[in-house]
Image: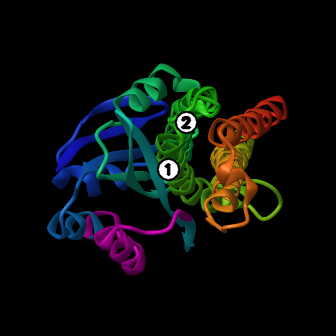
């Protein structure tokens, strides 16, 4: 679905144009065209391929989707695949943005993403001195917008992790904590798969080996790289904290089981002594003097009660009961 198709010149918007007019504006010096598509089908991509002369392999990647984040060079053009991240309640939604860039055009194809890039377009149009750099500045602005949307996701994951950590030492919350921690770990891993490859790809957009298209805007891509580096470090920190929290939670489960085992062992010892004494006096041998003693029965009960009481006292004093 076509969202926008706009021609720009000297950092200013010329006008909205139709798809049939794209080739006319591409031929005009100093002009570039910015086209935005959402959930484009094969027919729309074929039209864009014909209008912009896109590389077959890049179009094939955009057509199939579900690509690993990357930035590839095809002659004088660049093709980028970036993953967008959005939170819907507690669910992490991962979309895909395919960006085709050449000197006189930018084509962005957004898939499985609810948030658009109208704010990016407004930002670029408010900064004509930067938009004069042409399509490559738009490419930077799109990358920067996708990367900046990772920060709220990171903040949400950290906030959720803090809430879980507060519940780790609450009795009876162990199972719920483990389930929430594993959910967080899965989300952090999904986000890691979006950020880490993009970090490596963006690192090639500045420096001595940067594409010629990025020659005048390398400092902007270095800024995107810095943001990605911070995000990647935050994800690693979250994953380490989650692993530690899981270990602590499992340790609390083991401690709880150990406490139960100690109580059971203490009561078993008390009843074992009582059972042993009862077993001795219950053998009914003829020569046992206690059997003929008038006070033998209360005496036996007293001994059993005294021994069991002493053991109960000792176990409570040692913290087993």
On screen, residue 157 versus residue 2, left or right, reads right
Q: Which quadrant would the C terminus be assigned to in this image?
A: top right
Q: In the figure, 126 relative to 5: above or below? A: above
Asked if 182 appears above or below 223 in the picture, the reply is below
Image-based side of 174 in relation to 61, left or right: right
Q: Name the image quarter holding residue 313.
A: top right
- Specify the segment rendered in magenta: 50-70
Question: What residue is shown with label 1?
Answer: 187
| Count of numbered badges drawn on the protein | 2
Q: Nearer the viewer, residue 264 or 249?
A: 264
The image shows residue 266 at horizontal and vertical percentages of: 71, 46
Q: Are circles 2 and 1 on residues that touch, CB within 8 Å? A: yes
How many residues crowd mark 2 within 10 Å: few (<14), some (14–19), many (20+)? some
Q: Residue 159 appears in which quarter of the rendering?
A: top right
Q: Is residue 164 visible?
A: yes
**Residue reaching furthest to the bottom:** 57
Residue 153 position within the rendered picture, expressed as x and y whole percent measured from the top left: 51, 36
């Amino acid at each position: 679905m076509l969202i926008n198709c706009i021609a720009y010149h000297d950092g200013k918007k010329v006008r909205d144009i139709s798809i049939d007019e794209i080739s006319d504006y591409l031929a005009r010096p100093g002009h570039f065209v910015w086209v935005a598509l959402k959930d484009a089908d094969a027919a729309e991509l074929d039209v864009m391929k014909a209008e912009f002369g896109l590389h077959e392999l890049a179009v094939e990647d955009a057509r199939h989707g579900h690509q690993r984040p990357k930035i590839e060079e095809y002659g004088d053009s660049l093709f980028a695949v970036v993953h967008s991240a959005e939170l819907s309640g507690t669910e992490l939604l991962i979309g895909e943005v395919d960006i085709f860039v050449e000197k006189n055009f930018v084509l962005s194809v957004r898939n499985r993403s609810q948030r658009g890039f109208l704010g990016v377009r407004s930002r670029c149009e408010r900064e004509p001195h930067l938009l004069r750099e042409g399509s490559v500045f738009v490419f930077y602005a799109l990358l920067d917008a996708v990367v900046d949307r990772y920060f709220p996701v990171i903040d949400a994951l950290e906030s959720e992790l803090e809430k879980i950590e507060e519940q780790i030492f609450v009795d009876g919350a162990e199972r719920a904590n483990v389930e929430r921690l594993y959910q967080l770990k899965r989300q952090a891993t999904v986000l890691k798969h979006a950020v880490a490859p993009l970090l490596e790809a963006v690192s090639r957009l500045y420096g001595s080996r940067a594409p010629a298209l990025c020659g005048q805007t390398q400092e902007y891509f270095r800024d995107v790289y810095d943001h990605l580096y911070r995000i990647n470090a935050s994800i690693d920190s979250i994953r380490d904290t989650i692993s530690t929290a899981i270990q602590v939670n499992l340790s609390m489960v083991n401690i709880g089981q150990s406490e139960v085992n100690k109580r059971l062992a203490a009561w078993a010892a008390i009843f074992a002594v009582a059972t042993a004494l009862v077993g001795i006096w219950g053998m009914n041998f003829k020569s046992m003097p206690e059997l003929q003693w008038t006070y033998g029965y209360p005496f036996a009960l007293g001994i059993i009660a005294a021994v069991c009481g002493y053991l109960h006292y000792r176990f409570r004093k040692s913290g087993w009961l």
